Every structure is written in C-alpha cells, then in structure tokens.
C-alpha cells in the first residue's frame, strides 16, 4: 500500500468535462455485456435446474423491464437533483423538500445509503470471485497439464482474489486519468468481440442440421469432431471387462492390449478412457474400423421410454448412483422460437432474479453530476441509453445466440459444470469456423483477453462507485468520519477504497471456495478423479456426496448483492414518488405508475425467493434463504448502528419541525 499523505477535507469539486457520450460510456463500463455473458451463464444454467435454464432469455427480458422502470425513476430524479450522491443524495433532497416528509429526511437518507452498501460492497466482491473463475479457466487452457480449465484450482483462485482486488483498488486509489477514453475502448472491443461470437454461434446452428457431423469437447476441454468411446463401469466407476473384472483402476488410461476387453456402453457417458501409450482419448470405431464422426442432434432421443424428447434428457438424479430417481433435464432448444419463450412463469422469475446482476450499473452515472457539462439534460439520457444499448440490444442478441447454439455437442448440463461455458462454446464454433481445434482455442483465447480487460474496467468502476457512496456517508458523518476524507495527493477516498478492497477479497474467496457446491453444481466423482494430482488441487475439492449437500457460495454472494440491488431500486422508485407528487412537472405515468411498478417488481423478485423453492423443482432453498438472512442481519445491524451513533453524536433521528410563530 502506498505511503499516505495527511488526509485533507474534500476540495470544492471536479471540473465538468463530460458530455452525453462520456457519461453513457462510463455507465456502460459497469454493465459490460461482453464480460457478464462469460460469468453468469454458469449460474443461470445451474440454479433452478433441471428445467429453469429453458427460460433464460425471457428471464433477462423480465429483468430488463424491472430495470427500465427503475432507470426512469433515476433519470427523473437526476433532472430534479443533479448532484453527486445518486440515490443517497436523492433521498435526502426529496424528503427534505417536502413539508409533510421533511422530518424523515435523515432516516430516509441513512436507510437508502445503508441498503446501497449491501449492493455496492457486495457487487465488487462478486466481481473479484467471478474474475478468479475466468482466470482459472484461462490458465487451465494455457497449462492443461497443471490446471483444469473446467474446474479451476481453489488455491489459485484464492491467491488471485487477493492480488486482483488490491490491484484494482490501487488503480482506484491512484485515480484514473482518461478513464472515459479507456472505458470507451474497452466497450467497443468487448461488444465487437461478443457480436462476432453471436454471429458465429447462430451460423453454427444454421449450418449444422440434425444428423450433420459437428464438433464437441473431450473431457480435457479440447474441441474434437469424433465420437469418443464409452465403456461400462462398476459402482466405483472403474472400467470393467466382459467378465466384470476391473481394468487398470488406478488411473483413466487403458493399455492397448486391454482396449479390446472393454465393454461398450452403447453411447452412454459412464466412462471415457485414454490410451496409455498415446495419451489420447479412445475414439469409437465403426464397423469398418474408421473413426466415428461426432453427429449433431437437437432431438435427444434419451427419453426413459425410448421416445424423442426434443430438448430434454432423462438422467439419474444422483449420477453416481445408477439406482437413483430418474429426472428430466433441459439440454437445448429444438428451434429459435423455444429460445425466446418463457416456458414457465417460475422459470422466467428465477432467471430474472439472477439476471439483475448483469444489468445493474446504469444508475452509477447519476453520481457524476459534478463531472457533467449539462447534468440535468445529459445524465437522464445516459441512464436510459446505457441500459438500452447494453441490455436491450447486446444482451438479448448474445443470450439468444448462446442458447440457440446448444446441441448434443454442448448441452445445458455441460454449461452448468463449467467455469466458463462461453469459452467452451467459443472453442467449438471457432474450431468449426477455422477448421481445426487449434483455431478454436485461439479464438477463445483472444475473446478471453477482451473479457479480462472488461472485467478490470467493471471491477474498477463498481469499486470506485462503492467507495463514493461510503465517502458521501462519511462526509455526512453517518458512518465513521474518516471515510469522508480524501487522500492528500491523489484526492481519492483512500480509506473507503482500501476497506472495500479488503471486503472484496473476503467475498471473492467465499464465492470461489464453494462455487462447485450444491446439488446441480457439485462435481461428479469421475470428473474429480481426472483432475491433475498436484499442489494446486490438494485443497478445496469436495466429493460429490459432500458438495451436493452444501449451498453454492457463489450464488449466495450473488444473491446478497442482488437483494441489495432490489432494496436500493425499491427505495429509489419510492423516492421518485415522494419527490414528484406535488411537483409542477408531475406526470401520472412517469412519476406514479412506472415507479409503483418498479417497487412492486423489485419486491416481487425478493419475495419469489421465499416461495420459489417450494414451487419449482430443482430450486434450492439454501442459497436464497441464507442470502436473505445476511441481508436481514445487515439491516438489523444498520438500525442498531444508526440509533446508537445518533445518540453518541447528539443527533436527532427525526428532524424537528421549526416551532410555529405567532
């Protein structure tokens, strides 16, 4: 950490330099569609499995409706109060300027600021965690003999969380010169890269009809265009010969003389083995002894009764137990219309409640009132433009392409078991487009670099925004006053930044440590057996029997951040109602109907997590209830701190009305 100069009071304020383009670009940096498609597809594939993945695209549409209602409230409030504090500032001004609500101004301001911390302190930590997952996938692709791309090393990710969080915090601490230009470049690169992938994914689907030869991935995550042989195994998942005897159980390789002894599993997925001499996966042969090509299918004929199911398969609930209950699992969309259908109201709600993570950030620009040349005109436009460009256009195109691409070569259940499903898809479409597995690998790596750059920008943006909120509350003496001081040299809220960096490390580590926990996310024992046997995988790997009974910590931390978002957005929509109720510009649509819809929509998402686990098969109760418990504890602690701090400082909780004059 750099040597600190004596902290000084805040300067008068920054110089207004940003127009509409600059403000929009800064808001877009936090939404970052190129990055989030890599990060959240894993969670969206997992939660609510076995079937909720079918409603992914429509769930994002629902989340967009919620966000637009909230964005309009932010836009209208920024016209009325073009300051630098966003929701925290809006709440104070809206209540203080109303005769009937003025006495609640301090309470409203504190509640809004405290709720925003659940979001702004949780969000950077989740970003640190998901970036660690992408980094783990990245090094696994670079050094496959040391790391596994699909299952990143827990030790590596923990170390990465520390370095990444404090590295980004140092950039925020030093201040970023030309941040708008950097954000513009990152946005252009990542959007272009993801649109290229979207075009290629849709093209792959259109050019690979049912029954055509295509591409898939081998167990090491490499693109292949052949079918791998599968073999019957015993209860311990060891390959057996025709007499039921175990063949070389100590590893996954089979000596050439033993290959003929294996019993084919008729297309199942029990066991794939490598040749001991060649170290290549054993390819299935046809009657003429030729390699069998991989055949693409969108009608998976794996119904328990032997009938085509179109988009689902029947699989064992516990794939480590052949006698477990058979459950139907969504795998792919049979056609384009299926991608955009809700399939189920519950599925759409599940997906919307996760998708809120990928859409938030549009409101961050409302904290830049002092940097805007024309705040009243340009900030409201930037709020809506950033959400429209990134959410309404980029996300809907990209998520359509990724979901339309799914097929027998890469199914939804495979996405649910990967640290970076989009990277897997890129290997396949790249291999098809360039005609080689190596071409697919390079296509994925180039895309991964653009995503990693976007993640740095996103984490920096949300960390800076979170520090601003803490700084504003510290300046008002609503949290410890040392948070309200700027560094003497860099003029940044250094204490808020370093505190947030430390919190982000803790949240990031918690997120990645239990990322592969939960009944749908837990690693199968057969996959664990194939992980590298080295230091990097000596800690943090849990057998399926244990991991499947534990809650997914990445989802918990994501939901904690999302619940903070829902609370903040609800409060902001209500603030808009208070602010405009008696104002001369009042509009029934913009200032009553839309904010009320925003309040109800955000509240509905939170309440769904209370009842959803009892309505939707596969929706675990552990993650949302733990996340709601953390949110409740944060609120209780906030109320306790507010009352105790007010008493110690001699502040009145309720602002006293002036005495009446006679």
Image (cartoon, rainbow, N blue to C red):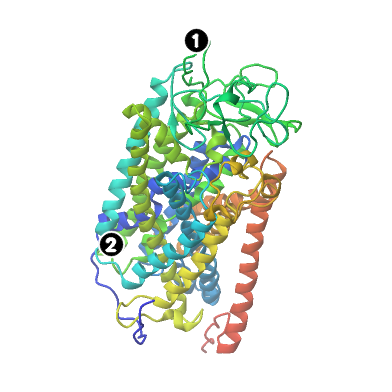
On the image, the x and y values in percent for residue 494 come to: 39, 76
> Looking at the image, which residue is at 45% across and 37% down?
424
Q: Residue furthest top?
A: 288
> Looking at the image, which residue is at 40% across and 52% down?
31
Q: Which mark is drawn over residue 223?
A: none
Badge 2 density bin: few <14, some 14–19, many ≥20, Cα 10 Å: some
When the figure is inspected, residue 399 is found, relative to residue 546, above or below; the finding is above
Which image quarter: residue 435? top left
> Looking at the image, which residue is at 40% across and 38% down?
398
When the figure is inspected, residue 462 is found, relative to residue 298, above or below; the finding is below
On the image, the x and y values in percent for residue 320 come to: 69, 37
Q: Which residue is mark 1?
A: 288
Q: Which residue is mark 2?
A: 179
Residue 322 seen in this snapshot: yes
Q: Secondary structure at mark 1?
A: loop
Residue 590 seen in this snapshot: no
């Amino acid at each position: 950490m750099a040597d600190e100069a004596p902290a000084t009071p805040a300067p008068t304020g920054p110089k207004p330099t940003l127009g509409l383009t600059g403000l929009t670009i800064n808001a877009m940096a936090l939404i970052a569609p190129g990055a989030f498609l890599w990060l959240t597809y894993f969670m969206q594939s997992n939660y609510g499995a076995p079937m909720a993945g079918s409603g992914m695209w429509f769930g994002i549409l629902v989340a967009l409706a919620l966000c637009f209602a909230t964005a309009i409230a932010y836009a209208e409030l920024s016209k009325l109060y073009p300051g630098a504090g966003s929701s925290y500032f809006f709440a104070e001004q809206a209540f203080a300027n109303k005769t009937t609500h003025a006495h609640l101004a301090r309470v409203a301001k504190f509640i809004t600021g405290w709720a925003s911390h659940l979001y702004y302190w949780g969000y950077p930590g989740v970003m640190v965690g998901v970036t660690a997952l992408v980094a783990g996938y990245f090094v696994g692709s670079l050094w496959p003999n040391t790391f596994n791309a699909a299952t990143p090393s827990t030790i590596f990710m923990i170390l990465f969380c520390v370095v990444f969080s404090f590295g980004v915090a140092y950039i925020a601490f030093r201040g970023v010169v030309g941040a708008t230009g950097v954000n513009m470049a990152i946005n252009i690169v990542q959007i272009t890269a993801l649109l290229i992938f979207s075009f290629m994914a849709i093209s792959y689907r259109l050019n690979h009809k049912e029954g055509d030869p295509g591409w898939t991935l081998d167990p090491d995550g490499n693109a292949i265009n052949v079918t791998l042989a599968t073999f019957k195994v015993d209860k311990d998942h060891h390959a057996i010969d025709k007499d039921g005897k175990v063949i070389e159980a100590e590893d996954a390789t089979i000596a050439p003389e033993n290959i003929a002894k294996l019993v084919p599993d008729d297309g199942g997925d029990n066991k794939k083995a490598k040749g001991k001499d060649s170290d290549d996966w054993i390819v299935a042969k046809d009657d003429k002894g030729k390699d069998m090509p991989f055949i693409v299918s969108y009608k998976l004929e794996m119904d328990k009764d032997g009938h085509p199911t179109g988009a689902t398969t029947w699989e064992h609930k516990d794939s480590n137990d052949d006698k477990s209950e058979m459950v139907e699992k969504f795998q792919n969309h049979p056609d384009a219309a299926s991608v955009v259908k809700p399939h189920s109201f519950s599925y759409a709600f599940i997906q919307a409640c996760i998708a809120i993570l990928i859409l938030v950030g549009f409101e961050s620009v409302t904290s830049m009132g002092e940097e805007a040349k024309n705040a009243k005109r340009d900030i409201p436009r930037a709020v809506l433009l950033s959400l429209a460009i990134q959410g309404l256009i980029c996300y809907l195109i990209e998520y359509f392409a990724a979901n339309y691409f799914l097929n027998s070569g890469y199914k939804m259940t495979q996405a649910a078991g990967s640290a970076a499903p989009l990277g897997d898809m890129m290997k396949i479409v790249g291999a098809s487009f360039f005609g080689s597995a190596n071409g697919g690998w390079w296509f994925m790596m180039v895309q991964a670099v653009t995503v990693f750059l976007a993640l740095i920008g996103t984490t920096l943006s949300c960390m800076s925004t979170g520090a601003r909120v803490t700084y504003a509350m510290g300046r008002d003496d609503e949290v410890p006053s040392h948070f309200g001081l700027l560094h003497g040299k860099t003029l940044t809220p250094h204490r808020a930044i370093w505190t947030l960096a430390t919190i982000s490390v803790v949240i990031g580590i918690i997120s990645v440590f239990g990322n592969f926990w939960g009944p749908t996310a837990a690693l199968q024992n057969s996959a664990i057996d194939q992980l590298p046997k080295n230091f990097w995988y000596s800690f943090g790997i849990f057998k399926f029997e244990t991991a499947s009974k534990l809650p997914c910590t990445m989802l918990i931390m994501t939901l904690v951040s999302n619940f903070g978002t829902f609370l903040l957005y609800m409060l902001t929509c209500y603030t808009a109602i208070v602010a405009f109720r008696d104002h001369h510009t009042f509009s029934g649509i913009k200032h009553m109907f839309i904010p009320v819809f925003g309040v109800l929509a955000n509240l509905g998402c939170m309440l769904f997590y209370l009842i959803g686990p009892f309505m939707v098969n596969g929706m675990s109760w552990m993650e949302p209830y733990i996340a709601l418990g953390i949110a409740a504890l944060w609120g209780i602690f906030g109320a306790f701190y507010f009352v105790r701090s007010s008493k110690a400082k001699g502040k009145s909780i309720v602002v006293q009305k002036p005495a009446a004059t006679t």
